Amino acid sequence: MLKREMYLSRIRGFYDNDLVKILVGIRRCGKTIILKQIIDEIRERKVEDNHIIYVNFKYVEFEELKDYKKLNTYIKDKIKDRKIYYIFLDEIQNVDKFEVVVNSLRASIKNASIFITGSNSKLLSNELSTVLSGRYVLFNIYPLTYKEYIELTKKNAKDDSSFEDYLKWGRIT
């Protein structure tokens, strides 16, 4: 897996910050991969797994948490001590009233660092920015650059067919 250092280097300084970290971008641009890479880096800092809360709303096992009240309860029930908890909510736009639960968690849990990802314009809506009122930092995530594509595929960057494949597919096939 290619480490998306271009993004990680920008996000790293916010790992332990109380601002909500929002990763937004088109479908399949790598938001989930970057989130998992952040989790890996946090684990490397010897953070215990029970202090990392990861919910991916594309997975069936989290289906019931699409109710914002159940999500709020689920997360709060996992917080047992005063050490920092890292909360990762992947594809949060699939939760109705997600902005309410994110704001509630941010306001009520002082020992949490919250990361959210999403693909649609609801993450950028006035409603979210009003609810969080400047208490977030936004990272726009884009598909692989040509340089990243070459690094990942090990193809010859100067070969026209490599560039044509990159333009045609825009991703690894």
Image (spheres, rainbow, N blue to C red):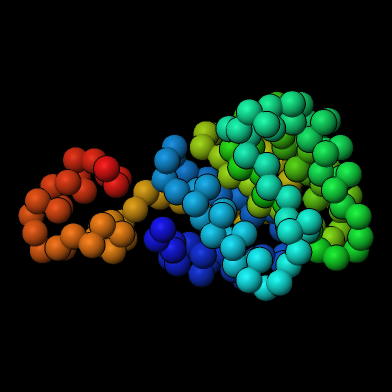
Seen as rendered, the residue at the extreme bottom is 45
The residue at the point 13 percent across, 47 percent down is 164
Is residue 123 rendered to the left or right of residue 106? left
Does residue 128 sit above or below 142 in this rendering?
Answer: above
Is residue 75 rendered to the left or right of residue 129? right
Is residue 84 rendered to the left or right of residue 11? right
Seen as rendered, the residue at the extreme left is 160
Query: Where's the N terminus, which quadrant?
Result: bottom left
Query: Where's the C terminus, which quadrant?
Result: top left
The residue at the point 60 percent across, 33 percent down is 59
Residue 11: percent from left, percent from top? 57, 64
Q: Quadrant of residue 167?
A: top left
Q: Quadrant of residue 48?
A: bottom right
The residue at the point 84 percent across, 61 percent down is 111
Judging depth in this view, the residue of 15 and 45 nearest the camera is 45
Residue 58: percent from left, percent from top? 58, 32
Judging depth in this view, the residue of 124 and 17 nearest the camera is 17
Residue 33: percent from left, percent from top? 49, 52
Does residue 97 sit above or below 22 in this rendering?
Answer: above
The residue at the point 48 percent across, 62 percent down is 7
